[in-house]
Image (cartoon, rainbow, N blue to C red):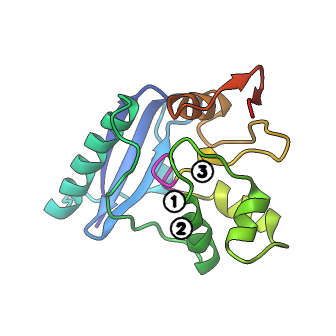
Amino acid sequence: MTTCRELKSPVGTLLLAANAKGLTHLLFADADGRPLRAKVRPDSDGSALAEQILGDTQLQLTEYFAGARTVFDVPLAAEGTEFQREVWHALTEISFGELSSYGALAQSIGRTRAVRAVGAANGANPISIIVPCHRVIGQNRRLTGYGGGLPAKQLLLELEGVRFNGDRIDA
């Protein structure tokens, strides 16, 4: 059973989805401003536990956007392959305001030759912001693709104290 909630944020409308095990999705609205509900199958009779998880997530995101939270502690229940879940876990190890690259992520999980696969798993991350795929940048210190768009990625990184010099991240 999945319960959904929309949240207006500085990076646009977000769709939150949870079940009794944890948060399953945190998605950006599409280009027309519509949340990507096609990726989530909500049930109308959501559980009280899922509602609690969504409430906690909404509160923690609000605190994050206000600059009052650097760590999230909601339970996560994203579905993916074992490899994807391994990459998503590695993403959660990137601290607030820190940056990584696909190569560094691949190395952190002991799969130095799987850089492209790590990039694909990063792109398939269903829990944006909390599983911080926005903290992954190119080796050249430039922003790389992001499901919420590069302006949202830059805003999130600036919120975390990352400084930009044009389209490059300051060292």
In the image, residue 15 sits, relative to residue 84, either above or below, namely: above
Which mark sits nearer the N-terminus, 2 or 3?
A: 2
Residue 118 lies within the magenta run? no
Q: Nearer the viewer, mark 1 or mark 3?
A: 1
Q: Which residues are magenta?
A: 126-131
In the image, residue 111 sits, relative to residue 170, either above or below, namely: below
Mostly what secondary structure, the magenta segment? loop
Mark 3 closeness class: few <14, some 14–19, many ≥20 residues within 10 Å: many
Mark 1 closeness class: few <14, some 14–19, many ≥20 residues within 10 Å: some
Image coords of residue 111 (percent x, y): 76, 76
Which mark sits nearer the N-terminus, 1 or 3?
A: 1
Q: Nearer the viewer, residue 145 or 65?
A: 65
What is the number of the mark on residue 89?
2
Q: Tell me: 68 left or right of 168.
A: left
Image coords of residue 135 (percent x, y): 62, 46
Name the kind of residue labelled 3 in the image. Answer: Cys
- The structure residue drawn at horizontal position 79% and vertical position 45%, both measured from the top left corner, is 138
Name the kind of residue labelled 2 in the image. Answer: His
Asked where in the image residue 153 lies, by quadrant, the reply is: top right
Q: Tell me: 55 left or right of 155.
A: left
* Residue tagged 1: 92
**Residue 46 can be seen in this image:** yes
Look at the numbered disc 1 and give the secondary structure of its residue: helix
Q: Is mark 1 in CB contact (under 8 Å) with mark 2? A: yes
Name the kind of residue labelled 1 in the image. Answer: Thr
What is the number of the mark on residue 133?
3
Spatial distance from mark 1 to mark 2, Cα to Cα?
5 Å
